[in-house]
Amino acid sequence: PHFDNMADANAPRPKLATVKTLIGRTGSRGGITQVRVQFVDDPNRSIIRNVKGPVREGDILVLLESEREARRLR
């Protein structure tokens, strides 16, 4: 595929979200952390996401997709 025109008019903008709380580790080897994030542009809105790699409270994530929410840990 060709990625010359990354500024696609109908592509949603990436959203910034701050990690508020670490909920727990998931994945078969514990390599995924479930976190609650709060959107920078809309502080009233928070969702749960899975994050791969090191993460801590206060980190800012760039969410390419901000509608999807992770299923809660069992």
Image (tube, rainbow, N blue to C red):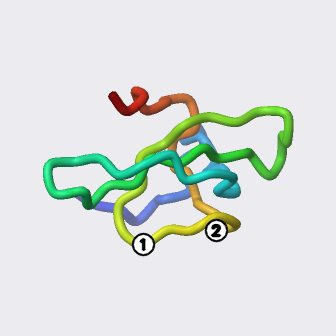
In the rendered image, which quarter is residue 45 located in?
Answer: top right
Assess disc 1: are there few (<14), some (14-19) or many (≥20) residues with their C-alpha within 10 Å of its C-alpha: few
Name the spot of residue 74 as percent of width and height, x first.
Answer: 33, 28
Name the spot of residue 17 as percent of width and height, x first.
Answer: 68, 53
Amino acid type indicated by mark 2: Asp
Name the spot of residue 29 as percent of width and height, x first.
Answer: 16, 57
Assess disc 2: are there few (<14), some (14-19) or many (≥20) residues with their C-alpha within 10 Å of its C-alpha: few
Residue furthest toward the left? 28
- The residues tagged by marks 2 and 1 sit, at their Cα atoms, a distance apart of 10 Å
Q: Residue at the spot x=56%, y=29% of the render?
A: 67
Image position of 18 with respect to 39: above or below:
below
Name the spot of residue 52 as percent of width and height, x first.
Answer: 35, 60
Q: Which residue matches tag 1?
A: 54
Foreground pick, 9 / 45: 45
Image position of 10 with respect to 58: above or below:
above
Answer with mark 2 or mark 1, whichever residue precedes in sequence: 1
Foreground pick, 45 / 64: 45
Secondary element at tag 1: loop
Q: Which residue matches tag 2?
A: 59
Report the side of 50 relative to 38 (left or right): left
Report the side of 58 relative to 55 (left or right): right
